[in-house]
Image (cartoon, rainbow, N blue to C red):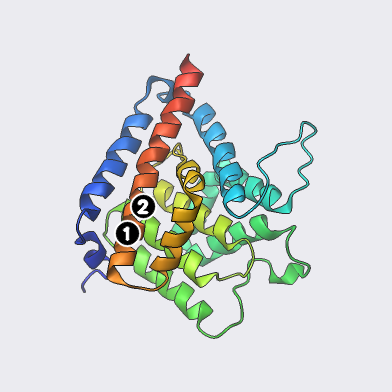
Amino acid sequence: MTDPLQPLVDLPGVRAAADRARDALAEVHRHKANRRGWPTTAAEAAVRAARSSAAIDGGSTELPADGQVGDPILAGSLRVGQALDGDALRNLVGTWQRAPLQALARLHLLAAADLVADEESLGRPRAEAGVAERLDLLVQTVLGSSAPAPVIAAVVHGELLALRPFGTADGVVARAASRLVAVSSGLDPHSLGVPEVFWLRRRQAYLDAAAAFGSGAADAVGGWVLLCCGALEDGAREATSIADSASG
């Protein structure tokens, strides 16, 4: 069968951008501070990613000294960040590889716990026609694809933003799912990269590109994939700065 993501890989510049992202992330994993001390880098990356992801959706970035986070968006994003670090990450990756819809449900439960009044809606896709079917099609497509991991991560990210499957905290879930793809595929096995900082710094361009991706136009989808590959490459530079600080 033809890989449904192959046309994306064949778009101008996409394969080269994916290769640059992969090389940049591989390089930061070879950093002297990450040969044995990568958990320190990963922990800091998780916090930076969570704060940036929350801010993209209008949340706070402030971490109170007493640890009591009042902003519900940031609180949810930090819970997701904890699930994307250490032993919890290994468990979540295993769930993603076996049952990706369960992994997405888990991410939503963590991200939206303070945002919804009805706890029964946590982790449940919206009831609107077509939502569950599109989610199922997405996971079947990406699990069966041999496209480069940066392309798959971009597609998962963009589709979840476009579909808004849960109706709350979908942005935090989409960015976290992109990280899951990067880890589970071996692109960023220790989750050291912080592409969320790149997306926050270019928030309007990010939102515009995501909206264009949702249109399905080939040039817009290609532009989104290129943006995401660039974010992964930039996120590796952010990870290098963390590692440099750790080894300084």
State the mark number for residue 223. Answer: 1
Q: Which mark is residue 91?
A: none
Q: Nearer the viewer, residue 201 or 154?
A: 201
Whole-percent x, y for residue 22 in the image: 30, 42
Quadrant, the N terminus = bottom left
Residue at 37%, 24% (x, y): give it. Answer: 31
Residue 48: give x, y in percent of width and height. 56, 38
| Count of labels in the image | 2
Give me the residue at 56% from left, 33% from top. 43
Q: Quadrant of residue 61?
A: top right
Give the residue at x 41% y 75%. Answer: 137
Residue 189 as seen in the image, left or right of residue 128? left
Label 2 crowd (10 A; few <14 / some 14-19 / many >=20): many
132 sits left or right of 19 in the view = right
Residue behind mark 2: 227
- Extreme-bottom residue of the structure: 129
Q: Is residue 20 visible?
A: yes
- The x and y percentages for residue 92 are 53, 52
For mark 1, give the secondary structure.
helix
Give the crowd class for mark 1: few <14, some 14-19, many >=20 residues within 10 Å.
many
Left or right: where 62 falls relative to 104:
right
Residue at the extreme top: 248
What amino acid is found at the position of numbered circle 1 in the picture? Gly
**The one of 180 and 65 positioned closer to us in this rendering:** 65
Inspect this view and state whether residue 186 appears. no
Residue 6, quarter of picture: bottom left
- Closer-to-camera residue (185/21): 21
Q: Are marks 2 and 1 in contact (CB under 8 Å)?
A: yes
Q: CA distance from mark 2 to mark 1?
A: 6 Å
Q: What amino acid is labelled 2 in the image?
A: Leu
Element type where label 2 sits in the image: helix
**Is 159 located above or below residue 71 in the figure?**
below
